Image (spheres, rainbow, N blue to C red):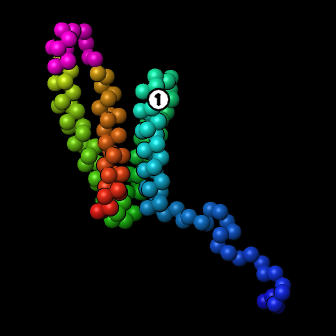
Amino acid sequence: MPTRGQLQPHTSAISNPLETLPMNKANIFMTASWIGLAGMIGAIVCLGLSLASIWAVSAAVLACLAAIVMLWSRGADEYTQALWTAGASVAFGSMVVTFLGLPFLEGMYDGFTDTEGGPDIPTEVVLLFAVLCFYIGVFAKRLRGDA
C-alpha cells in the first residue's frame, strides 16, 4: 500500500478501452440496429443519387447483415424481443401490402399511360421496402418507449 504522497498504480476499470462498454446481447442488438438503419439510408441515398449499383448493394447487404445480427441477439431481454417483434410485424405487413398492391399500381400506371411494355416497378422494391419497414418499426417502437 503506497504511503501518502506516493503515486498509486492505475487500477481503474477504464484502463482498457474495450471494458468501457460491455458488449452483451442487448448492446449488440442496439448497435446492429443503428448500423442497419445507416445501411438502409445509404442504400436509399445511393439509389436516389444514381450512384454505382455496387454502393447501393453494399449498403443494402450491410443492412441485411445487421438484421441477421439482430436476429441472433433478439432474445437478450424483453425490450429487445419487443423491438424485434415490432420490426418483424411491420416488415411482414409491408410485404403483404406490396405483394398485393404493387401489381395493382403497376396495372393502374400502365392503364393511365397506355403502355404495357413490361414491369415499370422493379421487383426488388418489395424486399428493400420490407427491410426499410423493419427498421422503421424497430425505431418507432424505440422512440415511443412502450416496449
In the image, what residue occupies the spot 46% across and 42% down?
38
Q: Is residue 84 visible?
A: no
> In this view of the protein, which residue sits in the foreground, 82 or 7?
7
Q: Check the image and report above or below for 110 versus 69.
A: above
Toward the right, the furthest residue is 6
> In this view of the protein, which residue sits in the foreground, 133 or 26?
133
Task: Look at the image and tell me in which quarter the N terminus lies.
Answer: bottom right
Q: Is residue 94 left or right of residue 18?
A: left
Q: Check the image and report above or below for 119 versus 30.
A: above
**What secondary structure is marked by label 1?**
helix
Q: Which residues are magenta?
A: 108-120
Quarter-wise, where is residue 122 in the image? top left
Residue receiving disc 1: 46
In the image, what residue occupies the spot 31% across and 42% down?
133
Q: Is residue 34 visible?
A: yes
Residue 37 inside the magenta-drawn segment: no
Quarter-wise, where is residue 21 in the image? bottom right
Residue 114 inside the magenta-drawn segment: yes
> In this view of the protein, which residue sits in the foreground, 62 or 121?
121
In the image, what residue occupies the spot 17% across and 31% down?
100
| Position in image of residue 144 (x %, y %) | 31, 58
In the image, what residue occupies the spot 48% across and 46% down?
35
**Of the residues shown, which amino acid type is indicated by label 1?**
Cys
Disc 1 crowd, CA 10 A, few/some/many (<14, 14-19, 20+): some
| Position in image of residue 43 (x %, y %) | 44, 33
| Position in image of residue 19 (x %, y %) | 61, 66
Task: Look at the image and tell me in which quarter the C terminus lies.
Answer: bottom left
> In this view of the protein, which residue sits in the foreground, 131 or 113?
113
Q: Check the image and report above or below for 29 versus 16.
A: above
| Position in image of residue 51 (x %, y %) | 49, 24
